Image (cartoon, rainbow, N blue to C red):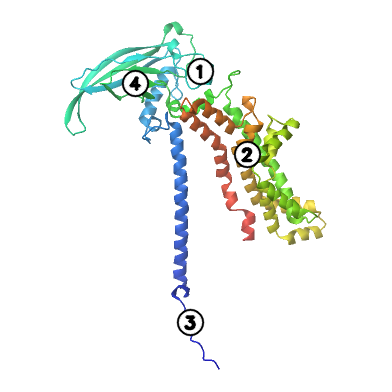
């Protein structure tokens, strides 16, 4: 007989751990996973919040990037509300109306040996935004308002320079008054009241109710796009401009509402059609065995590997021959049979066959089994497919750009954002407006996820099968 071999020693890593130690390891692993997800969520939310803050700024591309500015400064909100109330009696959205009498002050500082002179103030005839906004603008504040200096006062201040040496500085405050001219008492309400102040480079602006929109000519020219904005007009100026300046040149109607409505109609139509096609096709592929079913499934898989750019010419010609170009239906039907069919097929294959067989024994036909038993229990898969279909249709850019080209009010929000970038982001450099339009476009998708995300993670059917 062979000598018995000594039992191999059990490695420390394979020793059975006590229940308490194993539980502590599981809790530690869960904690690390939770912290990892929390870090990722914090980074993503931080990026989202930072981009939203940038959409409020006059210049989102400024360097260095400031977190604290007038749109986030409560003191500036109060000053903007006062100016808006004096300009048009509206503390929220401001403006300039007949009978306006607006007072605002600016304080300049200069070294003790320099002389502070009165800045030259004017209300320029400035056209806002792009050519579209300028073409729609009928009234300018310069034609109805006047600006004049009412008072000034001087003071001496002590401050330390860069070397830490205490020096005396002189400061002078100028109070200006903007009035709606009496000969224009029947004039219109004007949304913007721009103001320019020109002063020598030896004196520096150190205080004003709201900060100037830009500084030009090496600081000599300080420019305010609107000195009577109102509190909300100051904070959400870019968003207001998206609504007012994206307009049709012929009708003057704002296009942003039409773009959002078109995207919503297309996304809803594709959602409904996708659920119908995906549920029926997925159930047929999962349960019905017929000649060529495997070949049909392979063809469906292969079609999903072909980029849309390869077949868009043939699809375009088909839609043209069917007279569907420049209609929402062309964009709705283009992507109804995609990966959603595979998701539904996988769900139906995991559904217990015994339940269906019991219903068939009781006399139900295949369609009744699908409609009364299988489909009500497929709510998790249907909800996931609905959200994916809605999001895909809402964010779709290529097919709406190709299939819907006119009129301007027939565009979707994503294609409309392209016109914003061309009009404001290129030569204009007005990226705040473009960023505000992008944030408006993502609001429906964010609301969709907030309302339905808990149904994706946990459902009654999932609880019943665990």
Q: Name the residue under label 2.
A: 393
Q: Name the residue under label 1.
A: 134
How far across and down, in percent of the image, does residue 355 sit? 74, 59
Of mark 4 and mark 2, the one earlier in the sequence is: 4
- Number of disc labels: 4
Of mark 2 and mark 3, the one earlier in the sequence is: 3
Closest to the camera, between mark 2 and mark 3, is 3
Closest to the camera, between mark 4 and mark 2, is 4
Q: Name the residue under label 4.
A: 217
Q: How crowded is mark 1: few (under 14 residues within 10 Å), some or many (20 or more)?
A: few
Of mark 4 and mark 1, the one earlier in the sequence is: 1
Asked whether the residues under the numbered discs 4 and 1 touch, taking CB atoms below 8 Å apart as contact, a structural biologist would say: no
Res. 202 image quadrant: top left
Residue 322 visible in this rendered orientation of the protein: no
- Where 274 falls versus 171 (above or below)? below
Q: Name the residue under label 3.
A: 8
- Where 244 falls versus 25 (above or below)? above
- Where 145 falls versus 396 (above or below)? above
Q: Distance between the residues labelled 2 and 3?
A: 62 Å
Q: Distance between the residues labelled 1 and 3?
A: 88 Å
Closest to the camera, between mark 1 and mark 3, is 3
Q: In this view, does 286 lie to the left or right of 104?
A: right
Of mark 1 and mark 3, the one earlier in the sequence is: 3
Q: Distance between the residues labelled 4 and 1?
A: 24 Å
- Where 159 falls versus 279 (above or below)? above
């Amino acid at each position: 007989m062979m000598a018995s071999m000594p039992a191999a020693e059990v490695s420390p890593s394979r020793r059975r751990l006590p229940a308490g130690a194993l539980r502590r390891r599981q809790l530690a692993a869960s904690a690390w996973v939770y912290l990892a997800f929390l870090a990722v969520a914090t980074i993503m939310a931080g990026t989202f919040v930072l981009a939203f803050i940038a959409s409020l700024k006059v210049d989102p591309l400024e360097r260095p990037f400031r977190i604290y500015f007038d749109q986030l400064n409560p003191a500036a909100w109060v000053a903007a509300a006062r100016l808006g109330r004096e300009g048009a009696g509206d503390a929220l959205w401001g403006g300039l109306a007949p009978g306006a009498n607006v007072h605002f002050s600016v304080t300049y500082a200069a070294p003790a040996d320099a002389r502070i002179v009165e800045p030259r103030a004017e209300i320029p005839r400035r056209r806002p935004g792009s050519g579209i906004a300028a073409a729609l603008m009928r009234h300018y504040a310069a034609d109805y308002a006047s600006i004049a200096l009412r008072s000034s006062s001087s003071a001496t201040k002590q401050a330390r320079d860069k070397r830490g040496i205490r020096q005396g500085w002189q400061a002078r405050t100028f109070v200006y008054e903007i009035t709606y001219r009496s000969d224009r008492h029947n004039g219109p309400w004007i949304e913007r009241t721009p103001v320019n102040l020109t002063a020598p480079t030896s004196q520096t602006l150190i205080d004003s109710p709201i900060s100037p929109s830009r500084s030009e000519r090496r600081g000599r020219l300080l420019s305010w796009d609107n000195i009577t904005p109102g509190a909300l007009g100051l904070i959400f100026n870019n968003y207001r401009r998206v609504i007012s300046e994206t307009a049709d040149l012929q009708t003057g109607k704002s296009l942003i509402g039409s773009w959002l409505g078109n995207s919503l109609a297309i996304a809803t139509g594709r959602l409904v059609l996708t659920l119908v096609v995906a549920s029926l096709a997925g159930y047929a592929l999962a349960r019905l065995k017929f000649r060529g079913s495997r070949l049909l499934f392979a063809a469906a898989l292969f079609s999903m590997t072909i980029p849309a750019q390869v077949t868009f010419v043939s699809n375009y010609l088909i839609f043209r021959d069917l007279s569907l170009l420049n209609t929402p239906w062309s964009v709705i039907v283009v992507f109804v049979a995609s990966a959603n069919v595979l998701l539904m097929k996988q769900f139906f294959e995991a559904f217990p066959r015994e339940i269906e067989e019991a219903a068939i024994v009781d006399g139900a036909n295949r369609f009744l089994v699908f409609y009364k038993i299988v489909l009500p229990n497929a709510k998790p898969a249907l909800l996931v497919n609905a959200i994916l279909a809605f999001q895909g249709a809402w964010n779709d850019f290529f097919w709406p750009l190709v299939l819907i080209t006119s009129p301007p009010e027939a565009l979707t929000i994503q294609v409309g954002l392209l016109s914003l970038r061309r009009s404001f982001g290129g030569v204009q450099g007005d990226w705040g407006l473009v960023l505000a339009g992008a944030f408006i476009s993502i609001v429906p998708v964010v609301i969709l996820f907030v309302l339905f995300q808990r149904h994706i993670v946990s459902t009654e059917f999932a609880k019943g099968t665990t």
